[in-house]
Amino acid sequence: MSGSISAGTRVLGALGLTLMSTGAFAVPYYWTDWTGSDLDPGAGFQAQGSMTTPTSTIGVTYTNARGVGFYQATGGTDYYTNRGAGTSPYESTLVDNRPTGTDIIALQYAGSQTLSFTEAIANPVFAFVSLNFNGYGFDQDFEILSVGGEGGNACGYWGCGGITKSIVDLGGGRFEYQLNASNVGGSEPHGTIRFLGAFSTLTWRSQSNEYWNGFTVGVQGTAAEVPPCDIDPTGEGCNNPPPPPPPTSVPEPGTLALFGLGLLGLGLTRRRLL
């Protein structure tokens, strides 16, 4: 009798571990496909792109009144590659894939800029390249997910370098969330940060003139697809990391068979006990 109970327990234990492990992995992010060329007829710069999730296509517009260093929407150098072996500086326990393609907006001037989205997005990620001797001040809170040369991540295209986060009280209930190069471990930070919450615009300022530092943005889903993070009052990221989007395919027969066997084993154990 005790042997039957142990067998049934083992089946359920294995099934439970299988089900629990499905939530403990990084998930794919959908990076912006930047298209076209500069849409601003004056000295400024404006570009458009889109992020396509399993259920939605989100339009993205980037605007910078001072212009940019260069814009790469088709072809060119892939600045999201590694220097040396190891995990990409843009991948982490939450982000399963680095930016796809070679799309990048390279910045040059100090000043404000804005990303606008055609619908509210949840917890977007921001990949940055070569943030050396520079920094950004965002209007939304964020957490640092990965940095080249730290935590098992390889260096980025131009090398390694550390970053810091600081929160500046601007008064009147307004705060600026700063991402700054620390020049620890090198002067070429590459990595990914994640913003917390749901919103349709993101504004930040480049703190200095420096040619060049670049970025792109990605998303796991819209605010309707993925629950936004609650902001932890300690400033240490999400209170409730969102689950991955539900699978779009029917479970494989093998998975259903395993579940059925687990229930059958439990039923037989119960009958023997009776």
Image (tube, rainbow, N blue to C red):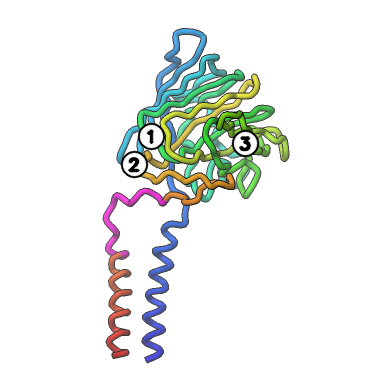
**Is residue 18 found inside the magenta-colored segment of the image?**
no
In the rendered structure, which disc, 1 or 3, sits on the residue that comes first in sequence? Answer: 1
Q: What residue is at 71 percent from the left and 36 percent from the top?
A: 186
SS state under label 3? strand
Q: Disc 3 vs disc 2: Cβ atoms closer than 8 Å?
A: no
Q: How far apart in space, not on screen, are marks 1 and 3 (Cα)?
A: 24 Å
Query: Residue 114: where, in percent of width, then height?
Result: 49, 24
At label 2, the amino acid type is: Ala
In the rendered structure, which disc, 1 or 2, sits on the residue that comes first in sequence? Answer: 1
Q: Name the residue under label 3.
A: 167
Q: Which of 160 and 146 is in front in this view?
A: 146
From the viewer's perspective, is 128 left or right of 38?
A: right
Q: What residue is at 51 percent from the left and 48 percent from the top?
A: 238
Q: How far apart in space, not on screen, are marks 3 and 2 (Cα)?
A: 29 Å
The numbered dot on residue 176 is none
In the rendered structure, which disc, 3 or 2, sits on the residue that comes first in sequence? Answer: 3
Q: In which quarter of the image is residue 264?
A: bottom left
Q: Name the residue under label 2.
A: 224
Q: Quadrant of residue 38?
A: top left
Q: Of discs 3 and 2, which sits in the foreground?
A: 3
Q: Is residue 200 above or below residue 29?
A: above
Q: Which of 230 and 179 is in front in this view?
A: 230
From the viewer's perspective, is 269 left or right of 114?
A: left
Q: Nearer the viewer, residue 215 or 66?
A: 66
Magenta segment: 243-255
The numbered dot on residue 120 is 1
Q: Is residue 179 above or below residue 19?
A: above
